[in-house]
Image (cartoon, helix red, strand yellow):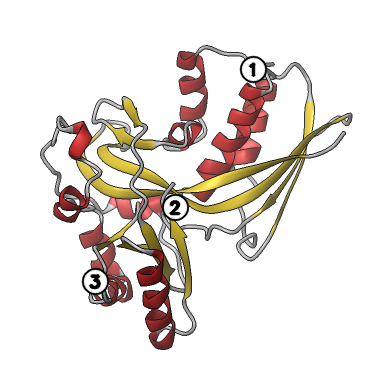
Amino acid sequence: MKFNNLKSWAKINLSLNVIKRLPNNYHKIESLITFLELHDEIKIRRIHTKEHKISFSGKFSERIEKKNTIIRLMNLLDKKKIIQGKKFQIKVKKNIPQKSGMGGGSMNASCILKHLIKKKIVNLPYKKIRELVNKIGSDVVLGLEKKNSILMKSGRIVRLNKKMNLFTLIVMPKFGCSTHDIFSRVRNFSKSSSFKEKNNLFTIKNLVRSNNDLESIVFKKYPKIKNLKYFLSTLPNVAFARMTGTGSAIVAYFKSKKSANTASKIFNKKYKKYWYVVSKTI
């Protein structure tokens, strides 16, 4: 059987507000989310073996945990007998850095699940799918649709068809940030913004006024990331720069590809050993 080729898009937080800590030590957040053309490459096909075969390759494939999101997804589908004993070979080429705040692992799981739903191998109502993905990771559900999304404080997700068409320069130092560690350091909380003006939330004017509540925590622990954001904010024609998720990646936003490419050259001259890539919002 031939492989199906999938693209697992990078997810970025345009804004992120931490509203409160929950009794289970998770946090209630609000966030504006979009996706980038930057993606991991996934090949999947059905095989006739007793076990799934899952492998990783690519620049960012080292030190992937044995109990990664794909393993957890497939084990859960097996345990609940949702895929009725079917087994799959899955090959993942990792182009998205780990611990960057771009949800690489979570988006891999949602990409595969979305494919299995499309092929009618998984046939569940949305409520059951939501329950399923929440057991794998809190942000896996976000990747089930490739649209600008609003994550409400209630956990409800609003999907928008509107596109931003912004170009990005994504940069990252030589280290990543632990999501658990960063959230464990949260002591102050934002008031809920309620996100009432949905049509205006993804405009440049609004996004410039937005923020990521986790930046102050990350910047205190990792001053290098703070310096990265400051440098990106001074680049020619940059609209704004912001950390995505818990970091360590910082994203600078531009209105044209030319401006993003020019900025990447300036960045590379100063930070020759740091990873960076120019991409575009979907």
Mark pair 2, 3: CA separation? 20 Å
- Looking at the rendered structure, the number of numbered marks drawn on it comes to 3
Q: In percent of the image, x 64 and y 62: which residue is there?
A: 62
Position of 88 compared to 122: left or right?
right
Per the rendering, the mark at residue 80 is: 1
- Residue type at mark 1: give it: Lys
Pointer 3 residue: 233
- Residue type at mark 2: give it: Met
Mark pair 2, 1: CA separation? 29 Å
State which tag comes first along the sequence, 1 or 3: 1
Q: Position of residue 91 (x, y in %)?
A: 73, 47
Q: Position of residue 139 (x, y in %)?
A: 42, 38
Q: Position of residue 137 (x, y in %)?
A: 47, 36
Q: In the image, which is nearer the foreground, mark 2 or mark 1? A: 2
Q: In the image, which is nearer the foreground, mark 2 or mark 3? A: 3
Quadrant housing the N terminus: top right
Q: In percent of the image, x 67 and y 30: which residue is there?
A: 75
- Kindly state the secondary structure of the residue where label 1 is placed: loop
State which tag comes first along the sequence, 2 or 3: 2
Query: Dot 1 surroundings within 10 Å: few (below 14), some, or many (20 or more)?
Result: few
- Residue type at mark 3: give it: Ser
Mark pair 1, 3: CA separation? 48 Å
